[in-house]
C-alpha cells in the first residue's frame, strides 16, 4: 500500500481539523478547481480520486479518508470515438452507493456537475431549477437516474446542472451559442462552474452547505444573433417560451 499523500492548502487554526475534500474528475473543470484551491488559503485536505461502477471511490496513490466531508464529482462519460472508455450514467454510482450503505466510507456533502440535458424532453416553456427533470435520450435518462441515485444517499447533495460550456478549454460552443438560429441557446462560462464548486467548498467549511439543485446559465437567451435577459426582456422571452424551452439561471433548495 502506498503511503497516503495529501496536500493541505492551509489550516486557519491548529484546533480545526481540515475539511476532508475528495475531488473525482480532474479534467478541465476538476483540474481548474484543484488549481484554484492550490493558491487559496483554506483549511482543506484534498484527495484526487476516481470512481468506478464496481469499486466505487478509489485512489491508486493514497488511502482515501473513511470520513469525507465533501465529495465533488465532475466527470464525463468518455469520448464517443473511444467506446471502450465509456461507462453508463445508470451504473457509475453503484459502487459508491454500496460503499456508503455498507459503512465502508461516510460522505457528509456531495456536489455533482450535471447538465441541462436532463430537461431535453421538455419542448417549450420556462424551465428553472424547480422544474422536474425529463429526458428522452439514453444518456439523458441515465443522467437523471444518476442524479436521483446521489440524492437518495445519506448526504447533503448539490446538483449543478450546467448549460453549454464555453470559455477556457471549451472553444467549440461559443460560436453555436451566438448563432442560435434553429432554437434559443444557453451557455455558461466554465470559470463560473469552477467558481460555484469553490463556493461549495467554502460553504462546507463554514457549515452552510445545503442540498440544492442549480441551473447554471450566464443569464442570456441567445436566439437569431440576439441575446435576451430575464427579467429585463421578460416579454420577449415569454413569447419565445410559447414555442421553445427556455432555461433560466436559478436555484431550488431541496431539503
Image (cartoon, rainbow, N blue to C red):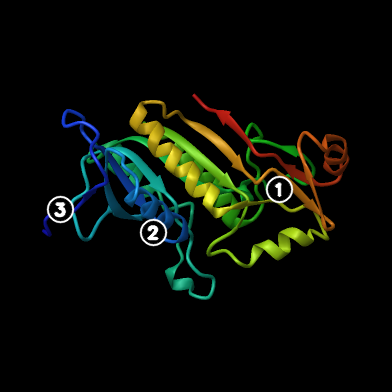
* x 59%, y 32%: residue: 251
Q: CA distance from mark 3 to mark 2?
A: 19 Å
Q: 78 left or right of 127? A: left
Tell me the number on the disc at residue 121: 1
Q: Dot 2: what SS?
A: loop
Q: Neighbour class for label 3 at 10 Å: few (<14), some, many (≥20)?
A: few
Rendering quarter of residue 139? bottom right
The answer to whether residue 219 is above or below residue 208 is below
Q: Are marks 2 and 1 in contact (CB under 8 Å)?
A: no
Q: Quickly name the residue at label 2.
A: 26
In depth, the one of 255 and 153 nearer the eye is 255
* x 49%, y 45%: residue: 195
Tell me the number on the disc at residue 4: 3
Q: Residue furthest bottom?
A: 81
Q: CA distance from mark 2 to mark 1?
A: 30 Å
Q: Dot 1: what SS?
A: loop
Q: Are marks 3 and 1 in contact (CB under 8 Å)?
A: no
Find residue 94 and report its horizontal and vertical position in percent. Answer: 38, 48
Q: Earlier in the sequence, mark 3 or mark 1?
A: 3
The answer to whether residue 1 is above or below residue 120 is below
Q: Earlier in the sequence, mark 3 or mark 2?
A: 3
The answer to whether residue 38 is seen in the rendering is yes
Q: CA distance from mark 3 to mark 1?
A: 45 Å
Find residue 187 and report its horizontal and vertical position in percent. Answer: 66, 52
Rendering quarter of residue 230? top right
Find residue 126 and report its horizontal and vertical position in percent. Answer: 76, 37
Q: 171 left or right of 91? A: right
In depth, the one of 241 and 186 nearer the eye is 186
Name the image quarter holding the N terminus.
Answer: bottom left
Amino acid at each position: 500500500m502506498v503511503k497516503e499523500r495529501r496536500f493541505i492548502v492551509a489550516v486557519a487554526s491548529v484546533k480545526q481539523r481540515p475539511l476532508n475534500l475528495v475531488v473525482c474528475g480532474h479534467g478541465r473543470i476538476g483540474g481548474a478547481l484543484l488549481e484554484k484551491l492550490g493558491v487559496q488559503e483554506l483549511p482543506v485536505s484534498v484527495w484526487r480520486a476516481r470512481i468506478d461502477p464496481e469499486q466505487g471511490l478509489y485512489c491508486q496513490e493514497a488511502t482515501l479518508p473513511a470520513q469525507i466531508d465533501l465529495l465533488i464529482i465532475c466527470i464525463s462519460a468518455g469520448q464517443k470515438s473511444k467506446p471502450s472508455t465509456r461507462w453508463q450514467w445508470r451504473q457509475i454510482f453503484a459502487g459508491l452507493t454500496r460503499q456508503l450503505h455498507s459503512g465502508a466510507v461516510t460522505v457528509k456533502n456531495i456536489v455533482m456537475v450535471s447538465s441541462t440535458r436532463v430537461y431535453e424532453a421538455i419542448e417549450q416553456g420556462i424551465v428553472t431549477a424547480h422544474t422536474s427533470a425529463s429526458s428522452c435520450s439514453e444518456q439523458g435518462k441515465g443522467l437523471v437516474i444518476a442524479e436521483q441515485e446521489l440524492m437518495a444517499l445519506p448526504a447533503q447533495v448539490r446538483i449543478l446542472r450546467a448549460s453549454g460550456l464555453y470559455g477556457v478549454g471549451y472553444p467549440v460552443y461559443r460560436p453555436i451559442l451566438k448563432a442560435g438560429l434553429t432554437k434559443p441557446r444557453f451557455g455558461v462560462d466554465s470559470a463560473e462552474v469552477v467558481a460555484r464548486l469553490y463556493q461549495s467548498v467554502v460553504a462546507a467549511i463554514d457549515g452552510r452547505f445545503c442540498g440544492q439543485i442549480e441551473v447554471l446559465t450566464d443569464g442570456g437567451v441567445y436566439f437569431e444573433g440576439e441575446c435576451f435577459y430575464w427579467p429585463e426582456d421578460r416579454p420577449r422571452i415569454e413569447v419565445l417560451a410559447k414555442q421553445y424551452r427556455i432555461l433560466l439561471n436559478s436555484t431550488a433548495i431541496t431539503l
